Amino acid sequence: FLDSSSLAQLENLCKQLYETTDTTTRLQAEKALVEFTNSPDCLSKCQLLLERGSSSYSQLLAATCLTKLVSRTNNPLPLEQRIDIRNYVLNYLATRPKLATFVTQALIQLYARITKLGWFDCQKDDYVFRNAITDVTRFLQDSVEYCIIGVTILSQLTNEINQADTTHPLTKHRKIASSFRDSSLFDIFTLSCNLLKQASGKNLNLNDESQHGLLMQLLKLTHNCLNFDFIGTSTDESSDDLCTVQIPTSWRSAFLDSSTLQLFFDLYHSIPPSFSPLVLSCLVQIASVRRSLFNNAERAKFLSHLVDGVKRILENPQSLSDPNNYHEFCRLLARLKSNYQLGELVKVENYPEVIRLIANFTVTSLQHWEFAPNSVHYLLSLWQRLAASVPYVKATEPHMLETYTPEVTKAYITSRLESVHIILSRDGLEDPLEDTGLVQQQLDQLSTIGRCEYEKTCALLVQLFDQSAQSYQELLQSASASPMDIAVQEGRLTWLVYIIGAVIGGRVSFASTDEQDAMDGELVCRQKQYWDMVFLICIFCLLSLPQTHHQLYRRLSEVLGLNDETMVLSVFIGKIITNLKYWGRCEPITSKTLQLLNDLSIGYPFLSWLLGETGTMSEHFSFLGINNQSNLTDMRCRTTFYTALGRLLMVDLGEDEDQYEQFMLPLTAAFEAVAQMFSTNSFNEQEAKRTLVGLVRDLRGIAFAFNAKTSFMMLFEWIYPSYMPILQRAIELWYHDPACTTPVLKLMAELVHNRSQRLQFDVSSPNGILLFRETSKMITMYGNRILTLGEVPKDQVYALKLKGISICFSMLKAALSGSYVNFGVFRLYGDDALDNALQTFIKLLLSIPHSDLLDYPKLSQSYYSLLEVLTQDHMNFIASLEPHVIMYILSSISEGLTALDTMVCTGCCSCLDHIVTYLFKQLSRSTKKRTTPLTQESDRFLHIMQQHPEMIQQMLSTVLNIIIFEDCRNQWSMSRPLLGLILLNEKYFSDLRNSIVNSQPPEKQQAMHLCFENLMEGIERNLLTKNRDRFTQNLSAFRREVNDSMKNSTYGVNSNDMMS
């Protein structure tokens, strides 16, 4: 019972939580309210709060607490209680129209959550939570205030069902969303459109705040319906320009009716600009409906209406001065080409006028570059797709792109050049050149647009480059030139170099002509004195071109004296050395230069002469950390540098140990210096760290490059045993400093990686075993010490702890799967190296919460790939673990089965298959009369699994769920453990099958039963390869038959096993 004093105290706590600026008071209030939400009688207290609370904050607390209660997966509320809460919320909203907006929103959220989670709940054969439209009818028939509440309920419900949450399985979400789509969504969409038609038919008084709010909510509802994830693809904004709206076939009538499309264009012109973005968002979705919804004639008619609407907006562009309107309209224009072909567009009656208007709009937009810069992407995307389609158009109607693409290209180039002076002369303006990602994206698009009518593009660029280069030269020679004028010309030349490089890089080899080659050569050779610029241009165009492009090389020879590929490459090398020598402190330049060097070392092995050149100059390369001036984290570039040098060394190395030792002399000296420091009691720790980190980064680059046995053995014999203790000592000393440990651990992980079978030791060599001993020692030392760190803040846990653990997992996986160690030898001779490594793995694993395993992608990939090796080759070790460890591992596999990362999911399937196969074999042996009893580990493992059958049963349910109801991208991997799961749980599988069959409509049950019969047809009770392959084939047919059977069916499952 909640007395008046307790009520007042609760309301005061709510006020402190939401209003106070004092952090301590807020934290105390939050702690007290958390205790309230976790109390056993929270439900009844929340109802009393809603009934008697006078504060909006207390009503908000009650609503959010109730939402939390109905959402919990353990100990869920009974069905009757949830029905009562749903009815209470509806009555509460109906009798209190003047609630605070945030309270109304919280209560509507509560209603939506109850409805979604109870979608398949039945009471007397009635789905009690599927009457949303009936529930809101009384609101829609009342005043505008109540109508807003009704529309908001439907909008929030649609949004809630469309969004997956992490607390419930994805399979359950997709089943609910599919059923809602098939049973209710079209009715809600139709209702929304009808209400919009009624609103637009009346003279809306948009000065009336309530009518203003109703229109806004109706548009949000319509947009939520059109934005629904109809087929479970979970699209996001990153794939915006490729999005197709998969409208169900049953919605055809709404889109064949031109009044639906016309409604939104009419709304756009009749309502204030503040509403228009939502209208345009709806139009974007409508323009993106899948092509297969229409036949050719219907699509042409629909496109004609769409283009007419766009034309009308372009002829009356006043509302586009609003940035949100402008952005959505640019998206709409982009959808014209992403969803329709150029051959279809040119057949539209008003196409010539529309393409002219779009071109003018694009030119104007590009000239006003500071207005909504993020929207330009969509306009360039439209023109890029149009230009790319020109060679494939078969229609006889003129596309007129030869007229308008040069205008767009010119507008982009000139506007970027003009922007330089404006940015330099005004404070606060963002320089587009500083956003390299955006510039690169736009230039990629421009490269295609500029290739259409290429001679016009080249002429423009040549003219502008010559003008800017001449002006720049004159300014440099003038004593009175102002720094501003010089900066402007440098900015213009920078843009021109980027653009020239992009348009040359946009060439398509099979479509390039001699004339275009000559024009490319002309662009490259504009000014031979601007070597930095020419170098950048060359990077874009020459690396991928064979010497068959005679016209291009002829022009290079005439102007620059570069007669062939080798001479061009010498330009690159000179620039690389210059950059590394003089720009070593500039990380962006250094990293890109080294990436180019790395690419050259792969594609041009005859550049091995560069090795001596860079070796001579490297003492001047500041990025290598000379003069002890760099931070530990500033030396990442060294790995890339030494990877390139390592590749170049391998070209002529062969078995020449003298050449190898000569190359390694600086690294040998560095190792000896660190060893000397470690041998003394006191040494300069920072100097030792810097030297060691730089050294191991260098060595990792070399180890990565040495992928042949001969060269890698030279490296191995150089580092072991002489220098391995130094690495171990570094881990021992600086385990708490990831700037030191991460490079060392990564080097060790690279050394044990049997890439290209480079770790092939002679039959008389113990080096494989010795290498694993060192690996085990490092993992054990790091693991035991990193666990002493204690509590680590959440925002630092990955950097300080999990990253190192992840590398250890990768290291152990590489060693265990390298096939250069016989691991049975360790136990045979009493060597504890293997046991130490595996036990450290378990300790590290148990220190990681389940959620972290999947939250950090690198950690999850390294863990599951290691677990796959352990379950395949070391199942006896897994079987010997304590019950709680085994359950932890099985839980992690169960969670990984539903991971979004396909690699993780596939790895979990493999792990599960190995475990299930092991279990099945042990069970089979235990039932046979054999002289050899089961090992102690096997017997314990069987006992544990028999005590906890629910874990294996849950995974059987999950795998079956994914195969039947989801877009299963790794069906073969899923099929492998499924047979074993079924054979281990035959009764459970039978119950599961009956539950699925009985949940189908009566007319579908026989077909579903037959699907399951066919699945097990011809399957024997064993896990032999032949039997598994037969089951995999049956499963493919089963999945097709089930999907066909469930089409046009509102599928529902009452079984809790299938739902959670």
Image (cartoon, helix red, strand yellow):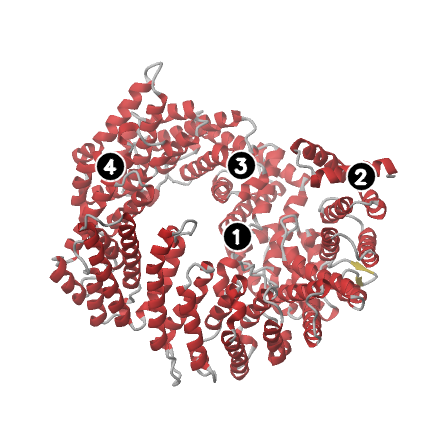
The residue indicated by pointer 2 is 40
Upstream in the sequence, badge 3 or badge 2? 2
Amino acid on which the number 1 mark rests in the picture:
Leu
Residue 759 percent across, percent down from the top left: 32, 39
Residue 1012 percent across, percent down from the top left: 65, 62
For mark 1, give the secondary structure.
loop
Query: Does the CB distance between marks 1 and 2 fall below 8 Å?
Result: no
Residue 490 percent across, percent down from the top left: 27, 52
The residue indicated by pointer 4 is 621
The residue indicated by pointer 3 is 795
Upstream in the sequence, badge 1 or badge 4? 4
Q: Quadrant of residue 517?
A: bottom left
Upstream in the sequence, badge 4 or badge 3? 4
Which label sits in the foreground, 1 or 2? 2
Residue 764 percent across, percent down from the top left: 29, 32
For mark 3, give the secondary structure.
helix
Residue 181 shown left or right of residue 712 in the figure: right
Upstream in the sequence, badge 3 or badge 1? 3
Q: Nearer the viewer, residue 196 or 875?
A: 196
Upstream in the sequence, badge 2 or badge 4? 2
For mark 2, give the secondary structure.
loop
Upstream in the sequence, badge 1 or badge 2? 2
Q: Quadrant of residue 174?
A: bottom right
**How far separated are the C-alphas under marks 3 and 1?**
48 Å
Q: How many marks?
A: 4
Which label sits in the foreground, 3 or 2? 3
